[in-house]
Amino acid sequence: MKQFEPARINDQYSLVLNPTGNVDLYKEGIGVVGSMSYYYTRNDLPLFICRHDPTADLRTIHDVMVLLDNQMDEMVDCGCLMVGGRNVAARY
């Protein structure tokens, strides 16, 4: 499974979706500063972003979520989503 492009929130923060359905929040110069399950808690993502970067605006949050949704769809289509060591995304 290919590595997805980071979804940039601003010049300091970006989100990366990984094959387990988790989203890692990266801060420039530091690395991972937070992580959450995108697959199970998508609705909490705006709060997750704002907790780390209160200046993030709704447009940016929307754009990030659209990008992550598209990446999640790709992961589901290829059967690459693994949760707890099991492939939960296989479509038949």
Image: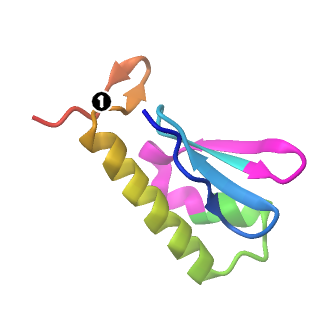
Q: Which residue is mark 1?
A: 88
Q: Give the quadrant of residue 59.
A: bottom right
Q: Position of residue 10 (x, y in %)?
A: 74, 70
Lateral position of residue 61 relative to residue 42, left or right: right
- Is residue 34 shown above or below 51? above
- Is residue 20 shown above or below 10? above
Q: Secondary structure at mark 1?
A: loop
- Outermost residue on the top side: it is 85
Q: Is residue 33 magenta?
A: yes
Q: 10 Å neighbourhood of mark 1: few (<14), some, or many (≥20)? A: some
Lateral position of residue 13 relative to residue 19, left or right: right
Q: Which residues are magenta?
A: 26-45
What's the residue type where badge 1 is placed? Answer: Val
Q: Position of residue 76 (x, y in %)?
A: 29, 41
- Is residue 27 shown above or below 11? above
Depth check: give the residue in front, 7 or 51. Answer: 7
> Residue at left 71%, top 75%?
56
